[in-house]
Image (cartoon, grey):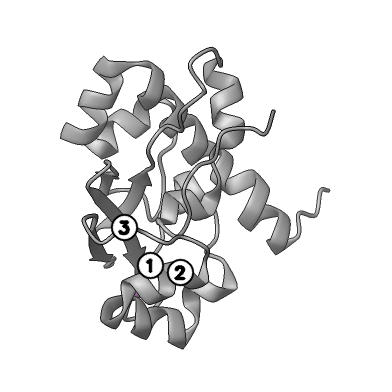
Amino acid sequence: MTIITATTYETKVGPRNGARVVAKAWVDPAFKQRLLADSTAAIAELGYIGRQGEDMVVLENTPKVHNVVVCTLCSCYPWPVLGLPPVWYKSGPYRARTVIDPRGVLREFGVDLPDDVEVRVWDSTAELRYLVLPERPRGTGGMSEEQLAELVTRDAMIGVAQVKAPAR
Ligand SMILES: [Co+2]
């Protein structure tokens, strides 16, 4: 019997599925189009289906729009693509402040967005679960889909981080 700690599941195992979705969207324009048009069905193409993932909406970050996901009521979270939510996602301060002061919360996570970037906050519900499609970082043109997936973090798919190119 294998015992996986909550921490491992939160940060490693669970979010790898979402990272594969993101990396595929970065390299496969047709998949990205399907992903944005019908997120649940496109994610299911990769086999990521199940509880808390029945009604997915993928939110695309662009140079002018940054999406952040929260659940103000409880801790709704897309289990099939991200695993279990981190402790801070369930915390009162994150749930309350993300709606009131998203830029302030993002700064605390190390994301300082220019004023001309619109921040959109999405409140998860039992019906809808969100996954952020982060921007592909510059300087990753030669990387494979697998290598790109390694760059994608859980926090970037919640919207409290940006994906960074590997240091040279
Ligand atoms: Co909830």
Using the rendered view, name the quadrant where residue 96 is placed.
bottom left
What percent of the width, then of the height, locates residue 141?
Answer: 48, 16
Residue type indicated by callout 1: Cys
How many other residues sit within 10 Å of disc 2, few (<14), some (14-19) or many (≥20)?
few
Q: Position of residue 31 (x, y in %)?
A: 29, 20
Residue at the spot 57% in from the left edge and 66% down from the top edge: 86
Q: Identify the residue at image location x=52%, y=19%.
A: 145
Counting from the top left corner in percent of width and height, residue 119 is at 25, 61
The residue that appears at 54% across and 40% down in the rendered structure is: 164
Would you name the residue on which mark 1 appears? 76
Mark 1 in CB contact with mark 2 (< 8 angstroms): no
Question: Is residue 137 or residue 84 the one in the foreground?
Answer: 137
User: Which residue sits at x=61%, y=23%?
Assistant: 147
Q: Are marks 3 and 2 in contact (CB under 8 Å)?
A: no
Q: Is residue 50 visible from the viewing direction of this image?
A: yes
Q: CA distance from mark 1 to mark 2?
A: 23 Å
Would you name the residue on which mark 3 appears? 114
Judged left or right of residue 51, residue 72 is left
Q: Which residue is mark 2?
A: 107
Q: Nearer the viewer, mark 1 or mark 3?
A: 3
Amino acid under disc 2: Arg
**Residue 36 versus residue 59 in the image, above or below:** above
Report if the CB atoms under discs 1 and 3 are less than 8 Å apart. no
Above or below — where is 139 with respect to 123? Answer: above
Residue furthest right in the image: 1
- Please, is residue 88 above or below residue 31 in the view? below
Is the residue marked 1 within 8 Å of ligand 1, measured from its CB? yes
Residue 105 falls in image quadrant: bottom left
